[in-house]
Image: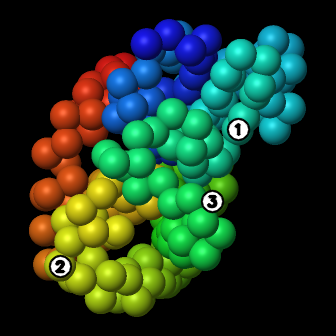
């Protein structure tokens, strides 16, 4: 179904989130496969969309939104069938979902994995810092341990039977961790094995990492 949706960005775990949610919801969208650190995010045209020159960027009609977590939450709240995806309607339940989303984005993504990315994968830009990388990997696993009871709670997803934006955030972090040679504990390997069977996940992998 057409809804005048356009997405900019490809090639990273963060852009993967936006593609995945769009495909999970069965939404048609125009796609501009620009990449980070390619110069494409510094063009005048793109900077009008996002002066912070980051991807992904979503445009829905005249509304422009950046930040991957905000994008997938907006899409789920705007387009999801709540029988299929977990999209809580009351403030308390929304706050609980947001709590997990913010924890994943701040502690697993920005506070751990991006430190590894900066000083391992991008050490030619930010410099080598093996001590910081090692501590960031330990911190990532420490925070996974804090999530273990949630993952082992019995349901296939973080909120039981229904998939949610939090699952997309967690799964992309787990994929990122594995690519950074971080050994995942058993419950998270099992969780990842379940989630990766979703057709939209596989379709998003093909689209996001085509290049």
Of the numbered discs in the image, which one, if any, rests on residue 115? none
The residue carrying mark 3 is 127
Q: Which residue is mark 2?
A: 154
- How far across and how far down the image is residue 116, in percent? 49, 65
> Is the C-beta separation of discs 3 and 2 under 8 Å?
no
Please report whichever mark, 2 or 1, sits nearer to the chain's N-terminal start: 1
Front one among 87 and 148? 87
Mark 3 or 1 closer to N-term? 1
Mark toward the viewer: 3 or 2: 2
Report helix, strand or loop for mark 2: loop
Whichever of labels 3 and 2 marks the residue nearer the N terminus, that label is: 3
For the residues labelled 3 and 2, the Cα–Cα distance comes to 43 Å
Q: Quadrant of residue 27?
A: top left
Residue at point 64%, 28% (across, down): 58
SS type, badge 1? strand
Label 1 neighbourhood size at 10 Å, few (<14), some (14-19), many (20+)? Answer: some
Mark 3 secondary-structure assignment: loop
- C-alpha distance separating marks 2 and 1: 34 Å
Q: How many marks?
A: 3
**Nearest the eye: 65 or 52:** 65
Against 178, residue 35 (above or below) is: above
Q: Is residue 69 left or right of residue 146?
A: right
Percent x, y of residue 179: 30, 54
Residue 107 drawn at (x, y percent)? 56, 75
Nearest-to-viewer mark from 2 and 1? 2
Q: Going 45% across and 39% down the picture, which residue do you hit?
A: 80
Q: Are marks 2 and 1 in contact (CB under 8 Å)?
A: no
Give how far across and how far down residue 40 sits, in percent: 67, 18
Task: Judge whether 13 appears above or below 101 on screen.
Answer: above
Q: Which mark is residue 66?
A: 1
The reply to whether residue 42 is in sight is no
């Amino acid at each position: 179904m057409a809804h005048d949706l356009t997405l900019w960005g490809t090639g990273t775990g963060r852009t993967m989130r936006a593609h995945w949610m769009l495909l999970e919801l069965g939404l048609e969208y125009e796609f501009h496969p620009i990449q980070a650190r390619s110069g494409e995010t510094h063009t005048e045209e793109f900077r009008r969309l996002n002066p912070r020159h980051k991807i992904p960027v979503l445009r829905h009609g005249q509304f422009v939104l950046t930040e991957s977590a905000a994008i997938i939450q907006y899409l789920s709240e705007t387009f999801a069938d709540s029988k299929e995806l977990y999209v809580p309607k009351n403030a308390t339940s929304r706050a609980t979902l947001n709590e997990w989303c913010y924890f994943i984005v701040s502690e697993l993504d920005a506070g751990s994995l991006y430190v590894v990315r900066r000083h391992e994968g991008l050490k030619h830009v930010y410099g080598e810092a093996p001590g910081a990388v090692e501590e960031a990997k330990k911190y990532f696993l420490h925070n996974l341990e804090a999530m273990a009871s949630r993952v082992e709670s019995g349901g296939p997803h973080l909120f039981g039977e229904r998939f949610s934006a939090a699952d997309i955030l967690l799964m992309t972090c787990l994929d990122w961790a594995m690519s950074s040679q971080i050994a995942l504990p058993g419950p998270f390997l099992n969780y990842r094995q379940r989630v990766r069977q979703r057709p939209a996940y596989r379709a998003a992998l093909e689209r996001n990492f085509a290049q």
